[in-house]
Image (tube, rainbow, N blue to C red):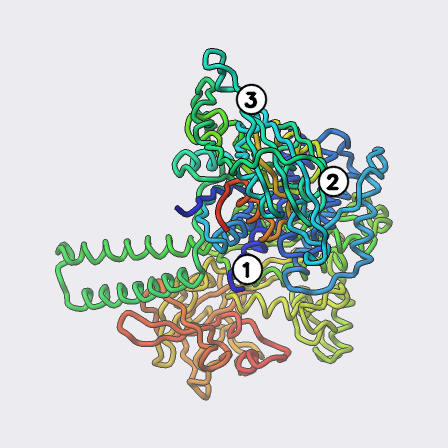
Amino acid sequence: MSTMNAIRDTFFEECEDLLAALADGFALMQSGAHDPETVNAVFRAVHSIKGGAGAFHLSDLVAFAHRFETVLDGLRGGKLELTPDLMFVLLRAADHLNVLVEAARDDTAIDAAVTESFLLSLDACLEDSGLGGSEEEFSFAAVQFDFMAIDSDPLSAERTKFNITFRPTSTLFANGHDPAFLFKSLSDLGALDVTMDISAVPDWDDFDPTVPFISWTLTLATDQDEAAIRAIFDFVDGLCTLEITANVPDLPKKETAPMIRVDTPEVRAVVADPPSAPKPTEAHGPKPTLRVDLDRVDRLINAVGELIINQAMISQRVGEIAIASDSDVVTYVEDYRLLARDIQEAVMAIRAQPVKPLFQRMSRIVREAAEATGKSAQLISAGEEIEVDKTVIERLADPLTHMIRNAVDHGLEGPEARAATGKDATGTIRLSAAHRSGRVIISIKDDGAGLNRPKILSIAKSKGLVPADIELPDQEIDALLFLPGFSTASKISNLSGRGVGLDVVRTAVMALGGRVAIMSTPGLGTEFTISLPLTLAVMDGMVVSVADQTMVAPIASILETVRPAPEDMHYGPNGRYLSVRGKFVPIVDIAQSLGFKIGNDINPAPLLLLVESENQSQCALIVDEVHDQRQVVIKGLEHNYASVPGVSAATVLGNGHIALILDLDAIAFQRGFAAEPATEFATQSAGD
Amino acid sequence: MTLKVLAIDDSRTIRSLIRKVMEDAGFDCICAEDGVDGVNRFAEESPDIVITDINMPNMDGFGVISTIRSGTTNRMVPILVLTTESADHLKTRARDAGATGWIVKPFDDETIVSIVRRVTGARV
């Protein structure tokens, strides 16, 4: 049965591809492409889902795909016209097909009434065009070849004698049939006598090898009925003269000739048509791909991680033993470093996938959310070709769904409110992906009313998340949305659209090494930005010393290193500040934050790392020394130690030592209203 | 000699299913993923029977049948058409194109094996 399970998995994998192809096709059709191949590709996608689903007896899916396909067939055959209304119905039907496929895969139930409503809207399309009614109820048991069926007890059944005369045409042979095989099938039904009639075969001079002159008379004694016999001749119906007469006991048996095996290969050999070479058309399919077990790829990635560490160790040793820089060894080691990096990039590219399928799913979320809230919304996506690690894409689906729903539900105004402010009645959600300095930025931007900051602040106060008398700058009010406890929704799976649950979104994104930021302009809309690492396995880091510990700070967050002049250091009520280009930036002592140092021995001129968070707020971190900048392999700590506040992971350095990778966001920006463990030390430093 | 089956279908699921059913029945099964691939594999492998889908990219099932039937080698091989439609005009069309028989999807293992046996004379 495991083979069947594997094929079942194949089916659902294939469904994903097909649904993506469907979405692609619809996108083309929406942009005005009505060429037959586009429509046919769309039809084929639904058709293939139906075909596969039938094999696994997923009857709901089959029935829905069938009705869907009927409408597409009407479109394909030119019986239906692609109106905006029809396009809308098709898009919604495709959405529901997604839902049904997921339900079938996860074996969950779907509200039959919902499916029914989609079916009705599909049927309505057919009725509008006068195609309705002709659709016969789709029958699942469409097996045509039930000639083996036994509908009565064979022992008690009477055996009927049938006389069959059979005269094939030349087409019968040309279509690959062999009378001997037909007779063989007949003999499975009962006792069969075969007599060959060669009386029509002419003299040699008149013999045309392409014309069949032979006919047969057969006698079959069977407990089956005539339909069972006709079923055997089903394929050759119209390619032969066939007469079947039943139960004629007084018909004298013809001379009982032994069964003559017709040597059909001979017939094949003499039936000659002018030969013509096969005409294979040129193949122009998609690029060939190879499907590989994910485990193998992950093994490869691990091995490459070790390779990078090994390369770093060798480079370091070679550097230590003071070889002349023009020596061969130095060149080879440098080549090795470049090769290792090439290999690593190539391997990472194996896991990278375009965000397109993920984005495509989101247009369905927008439609659903718009329908549920009575708003009108459209999704515009950009940067679909940007590639991200497969795991990132998978784990991003839920947070992104959530944010898109939020954008429609909470971000966009209702049509009247939009009209009142002079906006287009249809709200727009822009979903885009882009590369920015070694990271992938995904942005969700609505053109709604923007965040209602006074309301957010009052909710936070009423929930006791901030002191009741506090005044906060806009940025910090926006950040309140991410606080645990701000929303009533506790899980991402809460898809009701009630409650924001952004803390869960942020947790999910942070688990991927990413950050979420929020920007909002009253009246113009809100933009959420998710910044993600390209890969989860390696990153560029700056190796620093803090309180005699070697640590790694992610390069992506570091703006610059600063050795400030004493006059740039300022002391305020909440600690020290650095004045940099006219701005005041809080200074955080990492050693103190991480608990390596107790007390306030203030170094008047420390070395500072100026870092910036996703929401553009800056912070200066005190380090003792900066060593170098290199690629490090990320080794997770969660497996062994659970989540450590302020530390995102560890790595192995070239000298074999372990170094912790700093979670700069947690250290630098989790300040103020402490709500989770990661902010404890930040509160300390803020109060020093 | 083991019966050699060539299955042509653009759906990976259907290909896997046919392969499983054929191999369970003791036949060899070769797969091709569209019509063009199918006729190429046909020329290379000289199968004893061809099972082909109709609606495929690059070359459809009718194209496969006419290419094989107008070829020089093994042109009278039995060709079965896989179809989800049982509409009579489709059968007529398949037969006019030169198909030996047809299998209506969804198919069950016994049906497809018995049809293959029927048109190839392969022993049970």
What amino acid is labelled 2 in the image?
Answer: Thr
Q: Which mark's residue is nearer the viewer, 1 or 3?
A: 3
- Residue drawn at x 84%, y 49% as measured from the top left: A415
Q: Secondary structure at mark 3?
A: loop
Is A183 drawn above or below residue A320 in the view shown?
above
Q: Which residue is mark 1?
A: A4
The image quadrant of residue A482 is bottom right
What amino acid is labelled 3 in the image?
Answer: Ser
Farthest-out residue, top: A205
Instruction: Using the rendered image of the protein, determine whether residue A527 is visible from the camera's viewpoint.
Output: yes
Going from N to C along the chain, the mark reached first, 1 or 3, is 1
Tell which of A330 and A90 is nearer to you. A90
- CA gap, disc 1 to disc 2? 29 Å
**Do the residues indicated by labels 1 and 2 lie within the same chain of the protein?**
yes
Marked residue chain, label 3:
A
- Residue drawn at x 68%, y 68% as measured from the top left: A493
- Residue drawn at x 66%, y 31% as measured from the top left: A242
Q: Which residue is mark 2?
A: A70
Q: Which residue is mark 3?
A: A199
The N terminus of chain A, quarter of image: bottom right
The image quadrant of residue A318 is bottom left
Q: Secondary structure at mark 1?
A: helix
